[in-house]
Image (cartoon, rainbow, N blue to C red):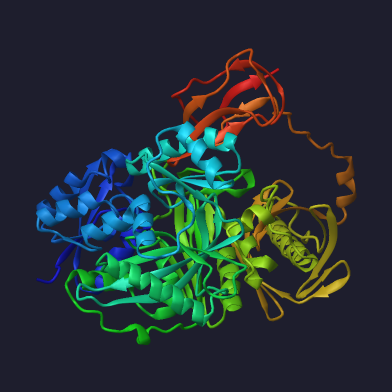
Amino acid sequence: MAITKILIANRGEIACRVIRTARKMGIKTVAVYSDADARSPHVLMADEAVHLGPPPAAQSYLLADKIIEACKATGADAVHPGYGFLSERESFRKALDEAGIIFVGPPANAIAAMGDKIESKKLAKAAGVNVVPGFVGVIEDTEHAVRISNEIGYPVMMKASAGGGGKGMRLAYSEQDVREGFEATKREGLASFGDDRVFIEKFIESPRHIEIQILGDQHGNIVYLNERECSIQRRHQKVVEEAPSPFVSPEMRKKMGEQCVALARAVGYFSAGTVELIVSGADKTGDGFYFLEMNTRLQVEHPVTEEITGLDLVEQMIRVANGEELSFRQEDVKINGWSIENRVYAEDPYRGFLPSTGRLIRYNPPEAVDGVRVDDGVVEGGEVSMFYDPMIAKLITWAPTRLEAIDKQIAALDRFEIEGPGHNIDFVSALMQHERFRSGNITTGFIAEEYPEGFTGAPASETLLKRLSAIGAFAAMAQADRARRIDGQLGKKLRAPTGWQVKIGDAVHDVVINGDDVTVDGEAVDMALEYTPGDRLIEAEFGEEQLAVRIAPVRAGFVLTAHGASHKLRILPAHAAPLAKHMIEKIPPDLSRFLICPMPGLLVALNVKEGDKVEVGQPLAVIEAMKMENILRAQKAGVVKSVSAAQGESLPVDAIILELE
């Protein structure tokens, strides 16, 4: 019996993604939603929608019984779980089987065998697959974790057994790190996945993270759809993915793919799945890869595989669930061009990548044309909630070559407008421009190695700064001309100045604009653009090069954002600029003695009390936001003068937690 109506047991971007494919196949859809998602795009896109409960996932999206009730109430004969939530829950698959509802995913035994990281490692080892050295049993407590870690040798990785998506993971370089992080890892696993078991394995330094996309049907046919490189990670959360990998040779691809297919066949796998491998970047033989885990679901980064293979993986999953055979074989799988995916997160890279929440005052993604694709599940005016993953959208580009796909990312990111919560657009643009990334010489330590002091914006070339100065002066002249034309301002006959002084950073540029003639510091600039005061995006041409710049007015100038950094421009008419040196600069207050909450969140731990002496680096408090725990440490030594917040309290951003003397 063919599937006629699918309920998507998920939310946001992936729910919208499944709905689009189901609609293309002529299949009706049912959305489910919590109170926080009542007006979300996936709810409006689906043919029907069913309310589940309050915002916390444990009271809504993780309630298998309510999902099944919704299926029965709407007549949905199948469920697509997306990723996260119930997608790798064996009990959910079994409950659907008992209710006679088709699960668009693998069989229960495969979920049980491979979805549990501890059991999957045991199975892989028994099957002769290389696994990373570690302890795959149940760890009793912190002391047991310390003993195991000491035996394996540091550094070690602590992982929640049921974890995924970068949650429930801690890297430990010492016994102290294990003591500080083991219980937090357990709590994150319990909060995010309902399972507090943790395993520990050796952390291979300078590795590459490469994964193989598997697809199988219910007739014993299994193929691998090439690899994805996912080495650009921050706090073990993938940020950039690409297909194929710049490191993997055809011989290595074949070895990896065949081994992963054999592993999938051993558990009777069908549907889409991903085998994650850790690969030694120093290995040139093609044998230096180790099994990490198998994700028995669709991956966030599946679009890059779709772009290079021409396959719709959601469609393939639905066809497999319908009992159809794969319409192609391994020899039919090709690699066409290159695809890059950047995850656009609600986080502030300028403040240590802290999670950010709030209303999307403005949301305007780049146009999906010419090899640019945007997968999202948000709209302007919607809310980025503290209850769910902070991903706003996925930006995917395709081109014949890797560098062309990267350059398309830079251009598209410049056109991505987001206002409200903080976002990482500047950061991922900086990654795309980084010479080491562009060379393909990447490891999972790339971000930590290249940004050890944090992110302060992408470096700008002298050419870019001069171009921004010219754009800023043109915008200032347009503002002045508008003021001239408004009755009573500047006099009707007075023309807008043509000479401007633009201060950008520490540099000062003299810009003169006479009609179409533009000079910066006496040098002619071939610039063409249109700007009307109030525009938020300027599309400029410099000869044959295009530059998209986001523009926002500030006192005495503009903030221009392009190529991974925001630049504040002070723009003054040339005749008034000399007077600026007489203006007194306001010095910001010293807040170093305060511990300030860096994001909206729950104060789950307060480690000190009034009168306690603290040292630099000492943990003072723990804030939980978006299912992740963040340790706040002392930036200076001192004595706790007062405590303004209590454990268990929900705090807004910039709330004072305590003050040091």
Quarter that holds the N terminus? bottom left
Name above or below for residue 78 compared with residue 311: above
Q: Residue at the far bottom: name it.
A: 331
Residue 254, percent across and down?
Answer: 44, 79
User: For the point 50% across and 75% down, which residue is it?
Assistant: 244
Q: Identify which residue is drawn at 14% across, 67% down.
A: 4
Residue 277 position (above or below residue 328) = above
Quadrant in the rendering for residue 194: top left
Number of numbered tags placed on the structure image: 0
In the visual, does 220 lie left or right of 498? left
Q: Is residue 163 above or below residue 335?
A: above
Q: Is 404 or 360 nearer to us in this picture? A: 404
Picture quadrant where residue 319 is located: bottom left
Residue at screen point 48% across, 37% down: 145
Q: Position of residue 131 (x, y in %)?
A: 45, 59
Q: Quadrant of the C terminus?
A: top right
- Look at the image and tell me whether residue 168 can be seen: yes
Q: Position of residue 634 (x, y in %)?
A: 65, 29
Q: 572 or 402, which is in the foreground?
A: 402
**Image x and y of residue 590, in percent:** 73, 29
Observer-nearest residue: 544 or 310?
Answer: 310
**Residue 601 visible in the picture:** no
Residue 565 as seen in the image, left or right of residue 348: right
Judged left or right of residue 40, residue 610 is right
**x 67%, y 65%: residue:** 434
